Image: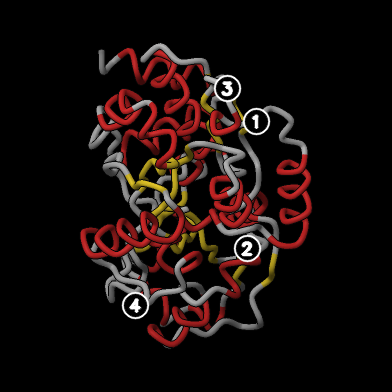
Amino acid sequence: MGPRSWVLGLRAWVLGLRGLLALAVPACSLGTDRIVVGSKNFTEQDILGEIVAQQIEHAGFKVDRRFHLGGTFVCHQALVAGQIDVYVEYTGTALVAILELPPTADPESAYARVHPLYDERFDAEWLKPLGFNNTFAMIVRGADARRLNLRTLSDAARHAPRWRAGFGYEFSERQDGFPGLARTYALRFAGPPSVMDLGLTYRALAEGRVDMIAGNSTDGQIAALDLVALADDRRYFPAYEAVPVIRWPVLRRHPEIGRALEALAGTIGDATMRRMNYLVDVEHRDVRAVAREFLAGLR
């Protein structure tokens, strides 16, 4: 999640749990040869889930898609329960949300921590990183950034007491979210940040209803709405490398699936992920078509 991968407030918890309860097709651990691919409930996850699904199909397997299940906890529990076989998780999210360990800004350190613990506790394997880091991004309007010469969060902190902020529920509460950010940068706003659905924050910023939001560094709407992501010059935010996580029972039975997914390692850079998000969110391209085009470029 990257950052969005936590459950997006109570509504997302309800929707995610409904999706989990609605899983009618059992995973391959229950005696079928179909691989169940899951995803969280935002665009980037749908795209990544589709890339994983098509890659597994290319290796000769049938795939059931269980996308838009909910946030991190819903997908994680589905994986542990064997109701999905694989989904893409983010190192920083797993470290902080699932394992409840201190965050780290170093990608290699984050991966080295989560990899053995998932094996030990959840009988699940972290494959190789896909190649991009979807970290939190504090975002302002491009016009404000140019007028005030804002490049970093330290620059913005000087102006924030006159601003209004709008954040998603989880960013307002989680330990690697706003509370720690405010301490690190002495960040204060004109009033308490508004808590809103993450899908509404970008429009709220572009339309002038708030002056700063917490988004994701790979969001396609940043460029589309003339917004600017500020540099985290004090390295507060953890690393959030995207990595396929697969249940070991599936990997033991079908090692060729692991090899197929490992072929995706390092193929999706930040700019590539941002472009795919843009195609779906802004140009309203079909997720399956975007994933298919990406994979065609690798083969």
Residue depicted at 28% across the width and 68% down the height? 105
Say whether residue 208 is left or right of residue 95.
right
- 19 versus 112 height, above or below: above
* Nearer to me, 197 or 48: 48
Amino acid on which disc 4 is placed? Ser
Q: Quadrant of residue 166?
A: bottom right
Q: CA distance from mark 2 to mark 4?
A: 22 Å
Mark 1 or mark 4, earlier in chain: 1
Residue on which the image places disc 4: 154
Is disc 1 in contact with disc 4, using a CB cutoff of under 8 Å? Answer: no
SS at mark 1 in the image: loop
Q: Quadrant of residue 40?
A: top right
Residue on which the image places disc 3: 32
Color encoding of the figure: secondary structure
Residue on which the image places disc 2: 168
Question: Badge 4, how many Cα within 10 Å: few under 14, some, many 20+?
Answer: some
Q: CA distance from mark 1 to mark 3?
A: 8 Å
Q: CA distance from mark 3 to mark 4?
A: 54 Å
Residue 146 visible = no
- 243 versus 253 height, above or below: below
